[in-house]
Image (tube, rainbow, N blue to C red):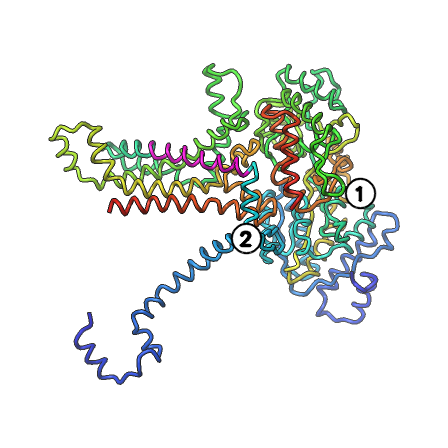
Amino acid sequence: MVQPTAVTAAEAIPRRPRGLSLGGALENPHLLGVLFTLPAVLLLGVFLGYPFILGIWLSFTNTLIGGKGAFVGLANYLGALMDSVFRLATFNTILYTVVAVWFKLVLGLVLALILNWDFRWKGLIRAIVLLPWIVPTAFSAIVFWWMFDSTFSGITWLLMKLSLIHTRIDYLGDPNLARTSIIIANVWRGIPFFAIGFLAGLQTISPTLYEAAAVDGATGWHQFRHITLPLLGPLLAIITTFSTIWTFADFQLVWIITRGGPANATHLYGTLAFQRAIQGGAFGEGAAISNFILPVLVLSVLICYLYLRREA
Amino acid sequence: MSEQSSWGLDRREFLKTTGAGLAGASLAGASLAGLTGSGTAEGAAALSPPAITPEKGATLRVLRWSGFVKSDEEVWNANSKKWEEQTGNKVLLEYLSWEDVRPKSAMAASVGAGPDVVLGWFDDPHLYPGKLIDVSDICEYLGKKYGGWYDVFRAYGYSPSLKRWLAIPFGSPAGTNNYRISWVKEAGYEKPPEKLDEFLKLCKKLKANKHPAGFTFGRAVGDGNGVCYWLLYSFGGKTVEKDNKTIAINRKETWDCLEFAREFYEAQTEGVIAWLDPHNNKAFLAGEISMTYNGISIYYAAKGKEEWKAIAEDMDHAFLPVGPPGKPGQISLVTQGFIFKHTRFPNAARHYLLFMMEKEQYAPWIEAMRGYVTQSLREYAKLPIWTADPKHTPYRDVVERMLPHSYAGIPGPQAAAALAEYVVVDMFQDAISGRKTPKEAARTAEDRLVKIYRK
């Protein structure tokens, strides 16, 4: 709101016609808005837009490292679809994402429900629960790498001491065991994100709802099913979307633990793209592989958006 | 190549005609010209280094792999400091874990910015030859002065298609068979046999004696590739023909090799199929395995710790055995120095790399690495480090047995892609795990190689 005195003062000063001077331009709310958002737009453009568009462009070329590529149309995409290693990576990526996100969601929810209880040192314990999420991924990956080591694994050692097994377990040598191992590592790392997110959601649910339900004779399960879950819905959609995006585009865990082996059994889009583009020098092909992540990400964001709109 | 005929003459003329303002450059000249006279090869005194006058006030950004031993970086840093003092220029050294140098160097090549000089790996220079400064004069001079380049280093440094040297080969952290003397004796052998069939028998006995061998078959850049290519080459197998087009993997030699590899794998300790580079070192030092393919790092780790001293005494190194054709063959990491065209100081960069390869700098550097890195020039095989401890000697001579990973083709984007994608390692994994028959595994590898070499 403009003060009456200010109006008088402004009117007292003769002004040049609007739009021709800097001062006049700055008084134009539309132009001013553009100016204010410009830094953010520029930042996004330079650090997000440019690499993104470059990635798309590269995927349509046969660029090799250090060279200028020519436009090859959809050849990289078609080549990838014909490639057995890519198809295996597609299977691995979907399996990895679906299984890991599902486990993270369920276990994260359970953990959040437990953490929501009133108990001693709950603040401290809630902080500790966040640890797997806080430590650098590379660090936790190395820890898991040792836990899944065929010679020095602590798990194997314990099981052997307990006489439950007599030969060592080849965690990362067998395709299915290797897949299971990296999924376990991802789940361990991702649970806190779900748990803390859900915990925040749980705390916004008014206790009076539970009290009213209890008076009406609702059991614990009914309360969970008809109060907790629906009220956590929007949060669940957002958290799951984020996690899906991160898991689908995962790189570090797999690269450190298996390098995509044995025989490509744990290659994800991220690791395969890195291997082809950076190590193998085929930028175009690597870019195309990583762009296969896009439709899935767009789809998951869309589902989340539609769900939230319906809820609203 | 410069038009000037001799570095020494240049310097003398230079000293006659210039004042103190150019003292830095003259000092550098003094150093290199001085070395010319101290060359060990016959007639080296007559050989002049290429005339290179480093730019004044240059700051070189040098990207290198972190030393496998501390003394490596100490000597490299001291040599760089010496160069700084002699030329008045500056060197900014960046050490990265050896596996991280390749992507960083590749990015520098791609964007045309970043380090001026890189000590990279394998066939990096062949991936972006157009981005690199010609070092032919330096390599030819070094070759003449120091008894010539070993074949494998020539293959990695020289581009036959461009007919020029792309990089200066600095050496190879080579691998040999590391074995426990007492356990091999216990199995009835004085030392590991030189033929693969007999070697397999030894592995089986070692396993029966609860001291299995542990040869890496996982996606380990150094050890996994090292073991798989050694077996492939030992059977006379190869990925591609000399024409660098005809894929040669799906052949009888490979099938026989994979058949053998299955039995060989069974005779190893559990889990080698997923081992990465550090695994075998730890397993050997923990006394879990009796033999493995590795650099000299295990030996030095053992020597450096009181509790492992007994292992150091009880271990030795031997050449990897040969297969039915009787010809040795193995790959190894090869490191080489190259200069990007985007550098503002091409002469300083060339001068620096040449300086580092001259005996005054190179010899103490190789000595300091205590056998981790094997010389690329024959003359340096005479360095005392190789005989100071007889356990070092196999690392000196193993270069004669090495072939490039592109064999029988030439290094370049295709061979680099095949290596980066672990096509050969995957083929072995498919076969030894029993997921595919040797023929199926070879056919899968062939399909992938055909795609790669068609690019």
**Residue B277 position by quadrant:** top right
Crowd around label 1: few <14 · some 14–19 · many ≥20 (10 Å): some
Determine if residue A303 is in view.
yes
Q: Is residue B75 left or right of residue A118?
A: right
Most frequent secondary structure within the magenta stretch: helix
Q: Position of residue A255 (x, y in %)?
A: 52, 38
Q: Position of residue A204 (x, y in %)?
A: 22, 42
The residues colored magenta run A86-106
- Which residue has dot 1 on it? B378
Q: Is residue A21 left or right of residue B407?
A: left
**Residue B391 position by quadrant:** top right
Determine if residue B92 is in view.
no
Q: What is the chain identity of the residue bearing mark 1?
A: B
Element under disc 1: helix
> Farthest left residue?
A215
Q: Relative to the observer, which residue lies in front, A182 or B215?
A: A182
Based on the picture, tell me whether residue A105 belongs to the magenta stretch. Answer: yes
Q: Is residue B422 left or right of residue B28?
A: left
- Which residue has dot 2 on it? A58
Q: Relative to the observer, which residue lies in front, B333 or B170?
A: B333
**Residue B442 position by quadrant:** top right
Type of amino acid under label 1: Arg
